[in-house]
Amino acid sequence: MKTMKPSLRIPVARLPLVFLKIILLTTTLIVGSVSVGLGQVNVPTIAPAQNQVFPNTTTKITFEWQKISGASYYKLVIFNITKSEAHYDNNVGDVNNKEILAFTYGDEYRWVIQAYNSTNTIIGETNPAQLFSIEDNLGACIEFSV
């Protein structure tokens, strides 16, 4: 006697909205608070290095990345993890580096670079997001939590 496994078939039109959202999310990778569509390419970063700790005497940091084919401009996004707020979020043009001033001692940051084409569509993004921190004003380092 052959045993059949029960199956459940529900027309998509009858699925609750929450299930449809879950299905749609399967085409996107979520990395922290940054999402990268599966059709996008990674934008490799050069500096600062992952988990780099800067001394509390640091007054500016140069962010550097590799350009990717098809990109017309780049957007640098820096998020202050410690304060849960955006630190910098701007179009930096068709360049491969940007110097940023004024970071807070003792704070941890996450950064990504996003590449856009000439139709203002994102075609690439750093994956995973890069982390760095600034020593506190006593010279102690904070630990990274991922």
Image: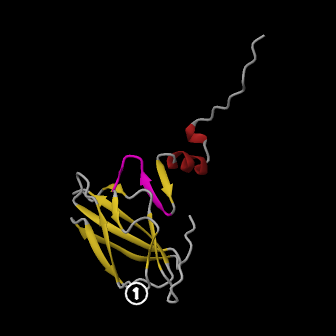
Q: Position of residue 82 (x, y in %)?
A: 53, 77
State the image quarter where residue 121 is shown: bottom left
Q: Which residues are magenta?
A: 33-43
Q: Residue farthest to the top?
A: 1
Closer to us: 12 or 67: 67
Query: Which residue is drawn at the image coordinates 43% and 81% (left, top)?
Result: 55
- Secondary structure beneath dot 1 equals loop
Closer to us: 36 or 56: 56
Q: Position of residue 43 (x, y in %)?
A: 33, 56
The image shows a total of numbered marks equal to 1
119 horizontally vs 36: left or right:
left
Q: Position of residue 123 (x, y in %)?
A: 31, 53
The reply to whether the magenta stretch includes residue 38 is yes
Quadrant assignment for the C terminus: bottom right
Label 1, on which residue? 57
Determine whether 143 is above or below 103 in the image: above
The reply to whether the magenta stretch includes residue 124 is no
Determine whether 85 is above or below 146 in the image: below
